[in-house]
Image: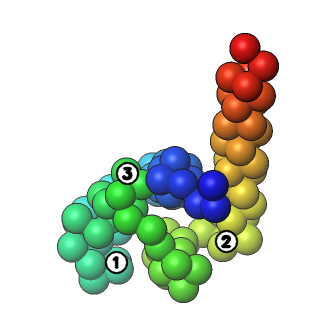
Amino acid sequence: MWVSPQDYRVVGECLAAVRSRAGVTQRELTFRLSKPQSFVSAYENGQRRIDILEFLRIVRALDLDPGTVFGEVADRAIESDAGASSSHAKGSSA
C-alpha cells in the first residue's frame, strides 16, 4: 500500500508529542496558526493529512526546528513500517 491512514496517525501523534513537549496547548497553537481547533485536532488524530508547507508552519508556530521534527517523524514512520512489515511476514508464514 502506498500511504495508509496509519501513516497519517504517525505524523499526527508525532506533532502532538512535540507540541506537548513544547508546552503548547492545542488552543494556543490554533491561535498561533489562526486556524480552528478542529484543524489541529484532526491532523493530530490522523484524520487529516498535512502537506509540507503546513508542516513547516505548524513547527515554526511551536518555535521548533523543522529538520529536527521531520527527523522525529521519519524515525517514527520507519519504526511503524518495520512493525507493519514484521506483522505481514508473520501473517504470511502462518
The residue closer to the viewer here, 94 or 70, is: 94
Reading the chain from its start, which is encountered first: label 3 or label 1?
A: 1
As drawn, the label of residue 65 is 2
Element type at mark 2: loop
Quadrant of the rendering where the N terminus is positioned: bottom right
In this rendering, position of residue 10 left or right of residue 33: right
Image-quadrant location for residue 4: bottom right
How far is mark 3 from mark 1, CA to CA?
19 Å
**What residue is shown at x 60% (from left), y 69% (from top)?**
64
Q: Does the image show residue 83?
A: no
Amino acid at the residue labelled 1: Arg
Image-quadrant location for residue 11: bottom right
**What residue is shown at x 78% (from left), y 19% (from top)?**
93
**What residue is shown at x 52% (from left), y 48% (from top)?**
6
Quadrant of the rendering where the C terminus is positioned: top right
71 w.r.t. 92: above or below: below
Contact between labelled residues 1 and 2, with CB atoms less than 8 Å apart: no
**What residue is shown at x 73% (from left), y 25% (from top)?**
92
Amino acid at the residue labelled 2: Asp
Across and down, in percent, residue 17 comes to 51, 48
Across and down, in percent, residue 67 comes to 73, 71
In this rendering, position of residue 72 left or right of residue 49: right
Q: How is the image coloured?
A: rainbow
Report which residue position mark 3 lands on.
Answer: 45
- Look at discs 3 and 1 and give the one toward the viewer: 3
Q: Residue furthest top?
A: 94
Instruction: For label 3, count other residues whose C-alpha is less than 10 Å away and answer few (under 14), some (14-19) or many (20+).
Output: some
Report which residue position mark 1 lands on.
Answer: 32
Amino acid at the residue labelled 3: Asn
